Structures are given as C-alpha cells and as structure tokens.
Image (tube, rainbow, N blue to C red):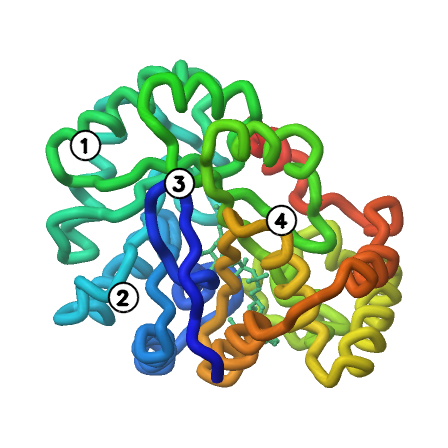
Amino acid sequence: MTDVPTRHLGRLAVSAQGLGCMGMSHGYGDSDDAQSIATLHRALDLGVTLLDTADFYGAGHNEELIGRAVAGRRDEVVLATKFGFANRLGEPTRVRGDAAYVRQACEASLRRLGVDHIDLYYQHRVDPDVPIEETVGAMAELVQAGKVRHLGLSEAGAHTIRRAHAVHPITALQSEWSLWTRDIEAEIAPVCRELGIGMVPFSPLGRGFLTGQYSSVEGLAENDVRRSQPRFADGNLERNLAIVRKLKDLAAAKGVTAGQLALAWVQHRGADVVPIPGTRRLRYLEENLGALALDLSPQDLAAIEAAAPPEQIAGTRYDATSLTFVNN
Ligand SMILES: NC(=O)c1ccc[n+]([C@@H]2O[C@H](COP(=O)([O-])OP(=O)(O)OC[C@H]3O[C@@H](n4cnc5c(N)ncnc54)[C@H](OP(=O)(O)O)[C@@H]3O)[C@@H](O)[C@H]2O)c1
C-alpha cells in the first residue's frame, strides 16, 4: 500500500482520497457498526484523513458512529459533515437553509460527533426559498464562533457558488462526479477553479456500479436506494453494463480492477479534486486506496472516456424530484 498523498481543498490540507461514510448508516442496506468502525480505524491507520458524513445519514446515526470512531484520534481527522435535509429518508424532500436552522443543525451535529468543531461544514442542498447569502452568512458566523473551520456547498450551481463565495470563502464543492456523471465539468468546475475552491466528487464509483460488482438489483437489500434509481432500472441497467464491461477490459489490461480505474480517472481530474469513495469494508477500502498509485497517460484517459461516452449512459442519476435539487 502506497502512502496516501496530500491534496488541498482551498487552504485545507486533506488526504488525496477521503472516505465516504454514508453507506455505514444509510442507503445501501443494513450495516454492522463494528465492521464500520474497523474500516474507519483502518482508514486512519493508512493515512486517510478526510471523513465524510452528514446529519441526514441514518438520521444522526452516521455522525454518532463517526464520533465514536474518532474519539481519541480527533487530531488525525478532517471531519466533514453537512446540513440541509430537514426530512427523513423516504419522506418528501424538505431542504432548509434559513439562519436559525443552520445554527440549530450545527449544534446537533457537534453534539452527535462529540467534538467542539467541524473542519468542513457543507450545505447539503441549496434551499430554493432562502437566499444563499442568508445561509452562508449564518455559516460564516459559525466560523467566527470557532464551531466550524471551513465552509462547503454540495450540488450548488455556478451562480450560487459565486454569490456564496462573495459572503465567505468557500473551501470545497461536493458534487457527484464520476465517469457516468460529468455535469459539473462544463460550467461549475471552471468557476470553482477560478475562485480557488476545491472539489470533492461524491459517488465516484457510480454508487458501486462502475466496479462491476452489480449486474442486477436482485442481490441488493430491499431498503437499498439503488433499487429506485433510474440507472439501475430494468433496461437502463443492461445498457450501462456494456460500459462496465469495457472498463473491466481496460482495467484487466493494466492489472487493476474496474473500480480502481474509475477512481483513478476521477483523481486525474486535477490536483484540486479529492474523491470520497464510500465503503463499509476493509477490502474495498484498501482496493480503493490502491487507485492512488495509478498513473494514467493521456491515451489511457482517452480510452477510459471512450468506454463511457455520456450519451450512452442510460437513465438520469437521480429521480425527477431529486434532480430538481441539484446544480442549483
Ligand atoms: N453530497 C451528497 O449529496 C452525497 C450524495 C451521495 C453520497 N455522498 C457522499 O459520497 C460518498 C461516496 O458515495 P456513495 O457511497 O454514494 O457511492 P460510491 O462511492 O460511488 O460507491 C459506494 C458503493 O460501492 C461499493 N464499493 C466501494 N468500493 C468498492 C470496491 N472496491 N469494489 C466493489 N464495490 C465497492 C460500496 O459497498 P459497501 O458499502 O458494501 O462497502 C457501496 O455500495 C458517500 O459515502 C457520502 O459520504 C454525498
């Protein structure tokens, strides 16, 4: 296992790959806390510093779990969490970004995490009914109070990012970015680069699909959110598998896995890009970190992109309702 290099999100130094913790509490079926904590500890032992959670994941369970895992190791960790979804999973989406909610959400996250400050605090989704200036103004007050060190946005659009950054420097944008989700490349990533904002691609493995591990939804738990995602739906899934087969061939030629190739492609988007693949398992954690050692040539990158042309991806990345909350 190679050492995990450092990258910078704005002025925040983090490991070049973070660990997405969502699946330990939410989205991908039932989890085992002991297994999750073992994975978190192994991640820290291997030099992963950036841990990604949110108050929404498992309705607070995920933050409590991370809090338990980092107790006694706080200084080794860059803790990133998010606020904004005021509903529970399965209920109609309700996003809140008003100042009172921001303050209340932060207090609750600090309590669950068992820490006195959050290193990177994101707004999970932009509230369409509250000016971003109010939301980021309240987040900036948390920085002044020492409760938060850096600010981030998730799935914000280019114009919102500019307005937010004018209120207080934004350190990172966390948005979906992978071989099968490239919407931020045209307009949003260039604005982040202009403003010196780092980028944190979420679901860099396409919710696991790009690893080639999932050929049908049959093996997924009944409560796995992928069962209701358009790209995993009948018809779309089969077409998307053709892309994964090509990725697997390219990966085999390099002696790596399809997941490692997909992750390495994201890592090659730039030195200001820090993906956060999610896993509950030691084996996947180690495999994913192995992607950091992959050096892809321009020819490799072109071949990988040719295997996954955006127009051949079948299905949208979210359902129609959830899509109304992204890139805003
Ligand atoms: N800001 C947002 O709105 C937002 C949205 C979604 C996610 N996120 C964040 O981004 C993180 C990552 O996204 P994600 O978890 O949705 O998707 P992902 O990282 O693309 O994929 C995670 C899935 O892939 C599986 N997996 C991981 N490594 C693997 C490997 N080497 N081989 C085979 N399967 C592998 C995991 O399985 P196991 O879990 O069984 O190990 C899990 O089912 C989340 O944990 C969360 O922190 C943020």
Mark 4 crowdedness (10 Å alpha carbons): few <14, some 14-19, many ≥20? many
Where residue 36 sits: x, y (%)?
36, 76
Gap between marks 4 and 2, in whole Å?
Answer: 26 Å
Judged by depth in the image, the label closer to the viewer, 3 or 1, is 3
In three-dimensional space, the C-alpha distance between marks 3 and 4, rounded to whole angstroms, equals: 18 Å
Q: In the rendered structure, which disc, 1 or 2, sits on the residue that comes first in sequence?
A: 2
Q: Is residue 205 left or right of residue 314?
A: left
Sooner in the amino-acid sequence: mark 4 or mark 2: 2
Front label number (4 vs 2):
4
Inter-mark Cα distance, 2 to 3? 28 Å
The 10 Å Cα crowd at callout 2, few under 14, some 14 to 19, many 20 or more, is many
Name the residue beneath numbered marker 4. 177
Q: What residue would you read off at disc 2?
A: 65
Contact between marks 1 and 2 (CB within 8 A): the answer is: no
Residue under label 1: 142
Q: Quadrant of residue 45?
A: bottom left
> Which residue occupies 42% across, 31% down?
95
- Mark 3 lies on residue: 10
Find out whether the residues at labels 3 and 1 contact each other: C-beta distance under 8 Å. no
Residues at circles 3 and 4 in contact by the CB criterion of under 8 Å: no
Find residue 302 and name its label.
none
Q: Amino acid at mark 1?
A: Leu
In which quadrant will I find the C terminus? Answer: top right
Towards the viewer: 297 or 192: 297
* Secondary structure of the residue carrying numbered label 4: loop
Identify the residue at image location x=28%, y=55%: 79
Is residue 165 placed above or below 107 in the rendered structure? above
The kind of residue tagged 2 is Leu
